[in-house]
Image: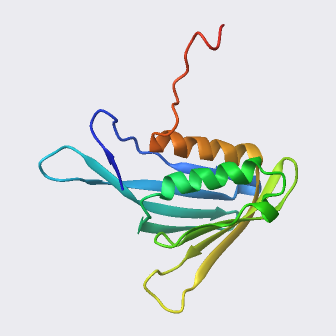
């Protein structure tokens, strides 16, 4: 669980992985107050949204593993960077959250992803919601970068001296 103090500020960040034809995966971090003695805010729960041209479904307030954000960022970077991710990059799984992502096929510029969400984490046998969509490698890499910024692993600040006008 990531802890943010007022110095970090907590934005209402929505991570969106857009697909072609109007499909998308959404992840919304849910903030909760930390201890009553401090002003810390804990982030460890997420809403998952699946969007396709004919439906929108949300899975609310799912608890993620402590390394969820960094693991997902690493997975997306590997999937977007690898020439044949469907063969060489193992599928992403967060069993606590009930989310899985796999690459079905790829070209030089496009990835076909399969998103799997467990419908009800407390029910046995498990039932899954599936969404397949194509997206660009650039969109996958951009989401990886956004996750790294959110997790504090990557700076979003640019030095003016590096990019002259």
Give left or right: position of 39 versus 117: left
The part of the image, by quadrant, that contains residue 85 is: bottom right
The residue sitting at 52% across, 30% down in the picture is 156
Q: Give the vertical position of 145 relative to 92 (above or below).
A: above
The residue sitting at 87% across, 48% down in the picture is 108
**Quadrant (top left, top right, bottom left, bottom right) of the C terminus:** top right
Q: Give the vertical position of 12 relative to 21 (above or below).
A: above
Give left or right: position of 143 versus 7: right
Q: Which residue occupies the foreground of this view, 53 or 13?
A: 13
Q: Give the vertical position of 118 relative to 104 (above or below).
A: below
Number of marks present in the image shown: 0
In the current view of this chain or complex, which residue is farthest to the right?
A: 107
Q: Position of residue 74 (x, y in %)?
A: 61, 51
Q: Position of residue 54 (x, y in %)?
A: 68, 68
Give left or right: position of 24 versus 83: left
Q: Which residue occupies the foreground of this view, 82 or 47?
A: 82
Q: Position of residue 127 (x, y in %)?
A: 57, 85
Q: Position of residue 80 (x, y in %)?
A: 73, 49
In the current view of this chain or complex, which residue is farthest to the top?
A: 165
**Quadrant (top left, top right, bottom left, bottom right) of the N terminus:** bottom left
In the current view of this chain or complex, which residue is farthest to the front?
A: 88
Q: Which residue occupies the foreground of this view, 102 or 31?
A: 102
Give left or right: position of 45 versus 124: left
The residue sitting at 65% across, 8% down in the picture is 164
In the current view of this chain or complex, which residue is farthest to the bottom?
A: 125
The residue sitting at 64% across, 13% down in the picture is 163
């Amino acid at each position: 669980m990531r802890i943010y103090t007022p110095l970090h500020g907590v934005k209402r960040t929505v991570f969106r992985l857009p697909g072609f034809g109007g499909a998308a995966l959404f992840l919304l971090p849910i903030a909760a107050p930390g201890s009553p003695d401090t002003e810390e805010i804990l982030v460890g729960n997420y809403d998952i949204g699946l969007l396709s041209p004919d439906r929108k479904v949300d899975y609310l307030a799912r608890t993620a593993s402590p390394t969820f954000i960094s693991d997902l960022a690493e997975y997306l970077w590997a999937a977007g960077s690898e020439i044949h991710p469907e063969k060489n990059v193992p599928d992403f799984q967060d069993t606590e959250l009930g989310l899985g992502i796999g690459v079905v096929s790829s070209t030089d510029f496009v990835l076909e992803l399969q998103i799997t969400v467990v419908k009800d984490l407390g029910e046995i046998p498990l039932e899954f919601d599936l969404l397949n969509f194509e997206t660009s490698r650039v969109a996958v890499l951009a989401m990886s970068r956004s996750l790294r910024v959110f997790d504090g692993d990557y700076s979003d600040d640019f030095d003016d001296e590096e990019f002259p006008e």
